[in-house]
Amino acid sequence: MKTSRKKTADGRFVAKRFDTKISTIEEQYGIKLGVRGDMKFGNYLIKKGYRSLSEMLQK
Amino acid sequence: MKESNFAFVENEVFRQNLDEAFDHITTLLPFTESVTYNEAAKSAFCKTIIIYTALIVEALLFYVLDKKFTESDIEDFYTSWELKNMKVLYSVNDSHQIVAGDYSRILGKTGKEKMNLGQIIDFLKAKKAIDSGLFVRLDVIRKLRNEQHIGTHKKVRVYSKKDITDAFSIARDVKKFVQKGI
């Protein structure tokens, strides 16, 4: 598990958002999620049955 | 501020801590869906996700407690009465006595920052800051977290998607509740 998470200028992590692309996540963590790379993370969560978590993400 | 998933939290450090915990959950979640890992590894990811989700719930509830109640409210809540130098004046029966003694008020020693999730939930319920429906759901996530380290441990429990979706559902409701109430 790599932790090459995006950071702000002052070194803080940028919160993952609803519109993060799956391809970005796959690339960051070296995993395959079996869905289209341009799918938004929030939509991926809904598709996989994680509606509650998706609703916690800022759109 | 715009980037945060907890933009309603005013304290920047607190908000950043919540965002980092939440981000860790969303980082771990795809690993539970990936075919690369076996069931034991996926269960371990689920356990971490549950712990982090409970952490967010606990932090958000503490935020409510800290905003709405003073240290003195906590002290009062944990205040009790203690009977010292007790003298039995009359024994009614085996389970009932008439007594005399020094009856003193003992101030509660717990402060806000020493309270755990169970204590925070009980306090907010007693103060009617949360309703009984939310109280019952909060107890579910508290048990989900605690059974990982406290309990009889008669068998190794495998954690699944159902456990984490239950935890997420409770966390979402708590986030909505805090957002509305602050």
Image (spheres, coloured by chain):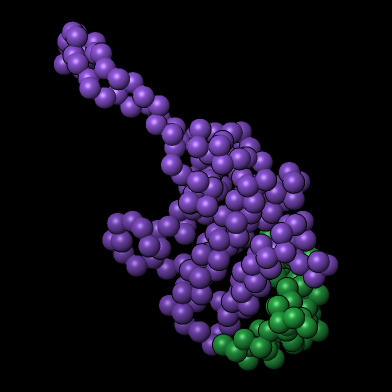
Chain colours: A green, B purple
Residue B158 visible at all: yes
Residue A35 visible at all: no
**Going 24% across and 10% down the picture, which residue do you hit?**
B98
The correct choice, above or below, for B120 with respect to B152 in the image is above
The residue lying toward the viewer, choosing from B180 and B116, is B116
The residue lying toward the viewer, choosing from A28 and A44, is A28
**Going 39% across and 31% down the picture, which residue do you hit?**
B106
The residue lying toward the viewer, choosing from B45 and B109, is B109
Report x, y in % for residue A15: 73, 73
**From the image, which quarter does the N terminus of chain B lie in?**
bottom right
The correct choice, above or below, for A9 with respect to A57 in the image is below
- Residue B34, quarter of the rendered image: bottom right
Report x, y in % for residue B75: 50, 37
**Going 72% across and 64% down the picture, which residue do you hit?**
B12
The residue lying toward the viewer, choosing from B59 and B68, is B68
Number of marks present in the image shown: 0
- Residue B78, quarter of the rendered image: top left
The correct choice, above or below, for B130 with respect to B44 in the image is above
Report x, y in % for residue B62: 60, 51
**Going 56% across and 36% down the picture, which residue do you hit?**
B73
Report x, y in % for residue B69: 62, 40
